[in-house]
Image (tube, helix red, strand yellow):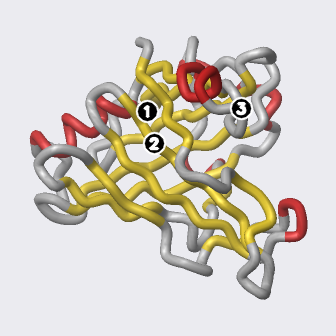
Amino acid sequence: MAQDDETFDQLMEWMEGQFDSGDQAAADTNYYNITLKMKRIWPEASNGAWLYVEQAMASSPDKPYRQRVYFVSQQSDEHLSSDIYSLKDEEKFIGAWKDPSVFVGMKPADLVYKEGCSVFLFYDGFQYGGKTNTGSCESTLRGASYATSNVSITSDALNSWDRGYDEKGNQVWGAENGAYIFKKRM
Protein backbone atom coordinates (compact mmCIF):
# COMPACT_ATOMS: atom_id res chain seq x y z
CA MET A 1 0.00 0.00 0.00
CA ALA A 2 1.35 3.45 -0.90
CA GLN A 3 2.29 5.59 2.06
CA ASP A 4 0.58 8.82 0.98
CA ASP A 5 -2.24 8.81 3.50
CA GLU A 6 -2.46 11.69 5.99
CA THR A 7 -2.84 9.16 8.84
CA PHE A 8 0.57 7.72 7.99
CA ASP A 9 2.19 11.15 7.55
CA GLN A 10 0.81 12.26 10.90
CA LEU A 11 2.18 9.17 12.64
CA MET A 12 5.63 9.83 11.19
CA GLU A 13 5.49 13.46 12.35
CA TRP A 14 4.49 12.35 15.87
CA MET A 15 7.12 9.56 16.11
CA GLU A 16 10.15 11.39 14.78
CA GLY A 17 11.92 13.50 17.38
CA GLN A 18 13.45 13.56 20.84
CA PHE A 19 11.54 12.37 23.89
CA ASP A 20 12.25 11.74 27.56
CA SER A 21 10.51 10.38 30.65
CA GLY A 22 11.95 13.02 32.99
CA ASP A 23 8.58 14.35 34.19
CA GLN A 24 7.37 10.86 35.07
CA ALA A 25 10.65 9.96 36.81
CA ALA A 26 10.47 13.14 38.90
CA ALA A 27 6.94 12.27 40.01
CA ASP A 28 7.39 8.51 40.54
CA THR A 29 10.62 6.84 41.67
CA ASN A 30 9.50 3.55 40.07
CA TYR A 31 10.52 5.07 36.72
CA TYR A 32 13.89 6.16 35.35
CA ASN A 33 14.56 9.26 33.28
CA ILE A 34 15.11 7.74 29.85
CA THR A 35 15.75 9.49 26.55
CA LEU A 36 14.17 8.21 23.35
CA LYS A 37 15.36 9.52 20.00
CA MET A 38 13.84 8.61 16.64
CA LYS A 39 15.06 9.78 13.26
CA ARG A 40 13.85 8.81 9.81
CA ILE A 41 16.42 7.09 7.60
CA TRP A 42 16.23 6.02 3.96
CA PRO A 43 13.63 8.69 3.08
CA GLU A 44 13.44 7.43 -0.51
CA ALA A 45 11.58 4.28 0.62
CA SER A 46 8.12 4.29 -0.94
CA ASN A 47 6.58 1.30 0.83
CA GLY A 48 6.86 2.71 4.37
CA ALA A 49 9.18 4.64 6.65
CA TRP A 50 12.38 3.51 8.36
CA LEU A 51 13.24 5.06 11.73
CA TYR A 52 16.46 4.71 13.69
CA VAL A 53 15.59 4.45 17.41
CA GLU A 54 17.93 4.96 20.35
CA GLN A 55 17.11 4.71 24.07
CA ALA A 56 19.47 5.61 26.92
CA MET A 57 19.43 6.63 30.54
CA ALA A 58 19.32 10.45 30.60
CA SER A 59 22.42 10.35 32.78
CA SER A 60 24.34 8.42 30.08
CA PRO A 61 22.99 9.62 26.71
CA ASP A 62 26.04 8.37 24.80
CA LYS A 63 25.63 4.81 26.14
CA PRO A 64 22.30 3.61 24.74
CA TYR A 65 20.88 0.38 26.11
CA ARG A 66 18.61 -0.14 23.11
CA GLN A 67 19.17 0.60 19.43
CA ARG A 68 16.64 -0.49 16.84
CA VAL A 69 15.31 0.29 13.42
CA TYR A 70 11.54 0.40 12.99
CA PHE A 71 9.83 -0.11 9.64
CA VAL A 72 6.40 1.52 9.78
CA SER A 73 3.91 0.71 7.04
CA GLN A 74 0.25 1.29 6.43
CA GLN A 75 -1.99 -1.77 6.30
CA SER A 76 -5.34 0.04 5.78
CA ASP A 77 -6.78 3.51 6.43
CA GLU A 78 -6.56 3.19 10.23
CA HIS A 79 -4.24 0.19 10.69
CA LEU A 80 -0.45 0.40 10.60
CA SER A 81 2.38 -1.85 11.69
CA SER A 82 5.84 -1.25 13.05
CA ASP A 83 8.31 -4.06 12.34
CA ILE A 84 11.34 -4.17 14.62
CA TYR A 85 14.94 -4.74 13.50
CA SER A 86 18.21 -4.89 15.37
CA LEU A 87 21.56 -3.70 14.08
CA LYS A 88 24.79 -5.59 13.64
CA ASP A 89 27.72 -3.71 15.22
CA GLU A 90 25.43 -1.38 17.18
CA GLU A 91 28.34 0.68 18.52
CA LYS A 92 28.91 2.10 15.02
CA PHE A 93 25.44 3.68 15.12
CA ILE A 94 25.50 5.41 18.51
CA GLY A 95 24.27 8.95 17.93
CA ALA A 96 23.06 8.21 14.38
CA TRP A 97 19.86 10.12 15.17
CA LYS A 98 22.01 13.27 14.86
CA ASP A 99 23.48 12.18 11.52
CA PRO A 100 21.46 9.58 9.61
CA SER A 101 24.02 9.65 6.78
CA VAL A 102 25.63 6.78 8.74
CA PHE A 103 23.00 4.59 7.04
CA VAL A 104 23.98 5.60 3.49
CA GLY A 105 25.21 2.51 1.68
CA MET A 106 23.23 0.20 3.95
CA LYS A 107 19.99 -1.49 3.03
CA PRO A 108 17.21 -3.20 4.99
CA ALA A 109 18.80 -6.60 4.24
CA ASP A 110 21.72 -5.53 6.47
CA LEU A 111 19.39 -5.45 9.49
CA VAL A 112 18.23 -8.36 11.66
CA TYR A 113 14.44 -8.78 11.68
CA LYS A 114 12.97 -9.49 15.14
CA GLU A 115 10.42 -12.17 14.27
CA GLY A 116 7.10 -11.83 16.08
CA CYS A 117 7.95 -8.43 17.60
CA SER A 118 5.90 -6.19 15.28
CA VAL A 119 3.61 -3.68 16.94
CA PHE A 120 0.19 -3.43 15.30
CA LEU A 121 -1.23 0.10 15.54
CA PHE A 122 -4.74 1.50 15.14
CA TYR A 123 -5.62 5.18 14.75
CA ASP A 124 -8.82 6.12 16.61
CA GLY A 125 -8.98 9.75 15.45
CA PHE A 126 -7.05 10.98 18.51
CA GLN A 127 -4.09 8.67 19.06
CA TYR A 128 -2.32 5.65 17.65
CA GLY A 129 -2.44 2.66 19.96
CA GLY A 130 -1.29 -0.89 19.62
CA LYS A 131 0.69 -3.83 20.85
CA THR A 132 2.60 -6.93 19.92
CA ASN A 133 0.87 -10.28 19.70
CA THR A 134 1.17 -11.96 23.12
CA GLY A 135 3.86 -14.63 23.25
CA SER A 136 5.20 -14.03 19.75
CA CYS A 137 8.26 -11.87 20.51
CA GLU A 138 11.07 -14.05 21.84
CA SER A 139 13.22 -12.61 24.62
CA THR A 140 15.90 -14.13 26.83
CA LEU A 141 16.61 -10.98 28.85
CA ARG A 142 16.69 -11.71 32.61
CA GLY A 143 15.16 -15.17 32.22
CA ALA A 144 12.30 -14.14 29.95
CA SER A 145 10.76 -16.37 27.30
CA TYR A 146 8.90 -13.61 25.49
CA ALA A 147 8.36 -9.85 25.57
CA THR A 148 5.32 -7.68 24.97
CA SER A 149 5.00 -4.02 23.98
CA ASN A 150 1.97 -1.80 24.36
CA VAL A 151 2.21 1.70 22.90
CA SER A 152 0.16 4.82 22.41
CA ILE A 153 1.31 7.83 20.43
CA THR A 154 -0.07 11.38 20.40
CA SER A 155 1.30 14.65 19.05
CA ASP A 156 3.18 15.37 22.28
CA ALA A 157 3.91 11.99 23.90
CA LEU A 158 4.76 8.38 23.27
CA ASN A 159 3.75 5.89 25.97
CA SER A 160 5.52 2.55 25.91
CA TRP A 161 5.08 -0.41 28.23
CA ASP A 162 7.63 -3.12 27.45
CA ARG A 163 7.61 -6.24 29.64
CA GLY A 164 9.31 -9.62 29.66
CA TYR A 165 7.66 -12.84 30.85
CA ASP A 166 9.02 -16.25 31.72
CA GLU A 167 7.62 -19.51 30.38
CA LYS A 168 5.03 -19.58 33.21
CA GLY A 169 3.74 -16.10 32.37
CA ASN A 170 5.43 -14.34 35.30
CA GLN A 171 6.75 -10.85 34.58
CA VAL A 172 10.55 -10.83 34.95
CA TRP A 173 11.45 -7.37 33.61
CA GLY A 174 9.88 -4.06 32.68
CA ALA A 175 7.80 -1.47 34.49
CA GLU A 176 5.21 -2.98 36.80
CA ASN A 177 2.79 -0.10 37.28
CA GLY A 178 2.19 1.09 33.73
CA ALA A 179 3.76 2.54 30.63
CA TYR A 180 6.72 4.87 30.46
CA ILE A 181 5.48 8.31 29.42
CA PHE A 182 7.93 9.89 26.99
CA LYS A 183 7.18 13.59 26.44
CA LYS A 184 8.18 15.01 23.07
CA ARG A 185 10.85 17.68 23.51
CA MET A 186 11.88 18.34 19.90
Establish if 168 lies above or below 105.
below
Q: Is residue 69 visible?
A: yes
Viewer-nearest of labels 3 and 2? 3
| Quarter containing the N terminus | bottom left
Q: Position of residue 10 (x, y in %)?
A: 20, 35
Question: Helix, strand or loop at disc 1?
Answer: loop
Q: Position of residue 16 (x, y in %)?
A: 39, 27
Viewer-nearest of labels 1 and 3? 3
Q: Residues within 10 Å of mark 2 (few under 14, many from 20)?
A: some
Residue drawn at the location 55% of the way across and 55% of the way down:
84
Relative to the observer, which residue lies in front, 113 or 59?
A: 59
Q: Position of residue 168 (x, y in %)?
A: 77, 87
| Quarter containing the C terminus | top left
N-terminal-most mark, 3 or 2: 3
Q: Which mark is drawn over residue 29?
A: 3
Residue drawn at the location 44% of the way across and 52% of the way down:
151
Left or right for 39, reference 78: right
Question: Helix, strand or loop at disc 2?
Answer: strand
Question: Helix, strand or loop at disc 3?
Answer: loop
Q: Which residue is mark 1?
A: 42
Q: Which mark is drawn over residue 159?
A: 2
Residue drawn at the location 16% of the way across and 44% of the way down:
126
Q: CA distance from mark 2 to mark 1?
A: 25 Å
Q: Are marks 2 and 1 in contact (CB under 8 Å)?
A: no
